[in-house]
Image (tube, rainbow, N blue to C red):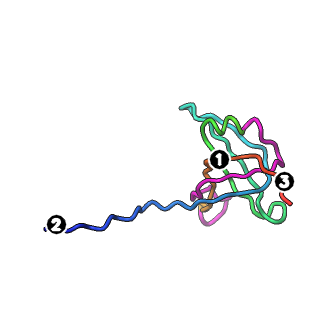
């Protein structure tokens, strides 16, 4: 008689997120030494300007395509996963690194202007 074990749950947990807002800074398109395009955005998705800024990163061909189409203040929608980050703290800070989050986007599109 063989005992069947229940399948193990997937230990990888990903927080999915969809962000809608306006670009708070100019998009930055760079290319890694391996040739991968990386587009970095800052999306203002708070009720008031500057209230909630979320960094968004998208890679690959989508980064190249959106990099030329996005402008400061454009309404965008980004969907992807929420990833933890560590940033350097300001000089004189007690903790040398500051935890944060960024959206690693699967898709970034131009959106209708909110409200």
- Report the residue at 70% width, 57% height from top: 19
Give yes or no for residue 110 being in the magenta stretch: no
- Please report the residue visible at 71 percent of the width from the left and 48 percent of the height from the top: 41
| In magenta stretch: residue 87 | yes
- Give 82 or 75, whichever is nearer the viewer: 75
Q: Do the residues under discs 3 and 2 have CB atoms within 8 angstroms?
A: no
**Residue stretch rendered in magenta on the structure:** 67-95
- Numbered disc 1: secondary structure: strand
SS assignment at label 2:
loop
Q: Which residue is mark 1?
A: 107
Asked if residue 38 is positioned above or below residue 92 in the image, the reply reads above
Which is closer to the viewer, label 3 or label 2?
2
CA gap between label 1 and label 3 equals: 18 Å
Q: Residue at x 65, y 39 (%)?
A: 62
Which labelled disc corresponds to residue 2? 2
Outermost residue on the right side: it is 115
How much space separates mark 3 and mark 2, taking CA atoms? 61 Å
Counting residues from the start of the chain, the first of labels 1 and 2 encountered is 2
User: Could you give the CA–CA distance between mark 1 and mark 2, rounded to whole angstroms?
Assistant: 46 Å
User: Picture quarter containing residue 98?
Assistant: bottom right
In this rendering, the count of numbered labels is 3
| Mark 3 neighbour class, 10 Å CA radius: few under 14, some 14 to 19, many 20 or more | few
Q: Is residue 50 shown above or below 28?
A: below
Q: Mark 3 sits on what residue?
A: 113
Q: Residues within 10 Å of mark 2 (few under 14, many from 20)?
A: few
Residue toward you, 102 or 92: 102
Q: In the image, which disc is placed on residue 50?
A: none
Q: Which residue is nearer to you in this view: 61 or 1?
A: 1
50 displayed left or right of 58: right
Q: Position of residue 45 (x, y in %)?
A: 76, 60
Which corner quadrant of the image does residue 38 belong to?
top right
């Amino acid at each position: 008689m063989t005992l069947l074990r229940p399948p193990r749950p997937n230990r990888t947990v990903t927080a999915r997120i969809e962000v809608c807002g306006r670009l708070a800074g100019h998009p930055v398109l760079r290319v890694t030494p391996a040739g991968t395009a990386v587009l970095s955005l800052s999306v203002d998705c708070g009720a008031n300007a500057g209230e909630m800024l979320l960094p968004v990163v998208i890679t690959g061909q989508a980064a190249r395509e959106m990099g030329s189409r996005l402008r400061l203040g454009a309404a965008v929608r980004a969907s992807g996963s929420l990833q933890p980050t560590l940033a350097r703290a300001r000089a004189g800070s007690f903790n040398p690194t500051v935890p944060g989050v960024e959206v690693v986007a699967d898709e970034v599109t131009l959106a209708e202007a909110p409200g």
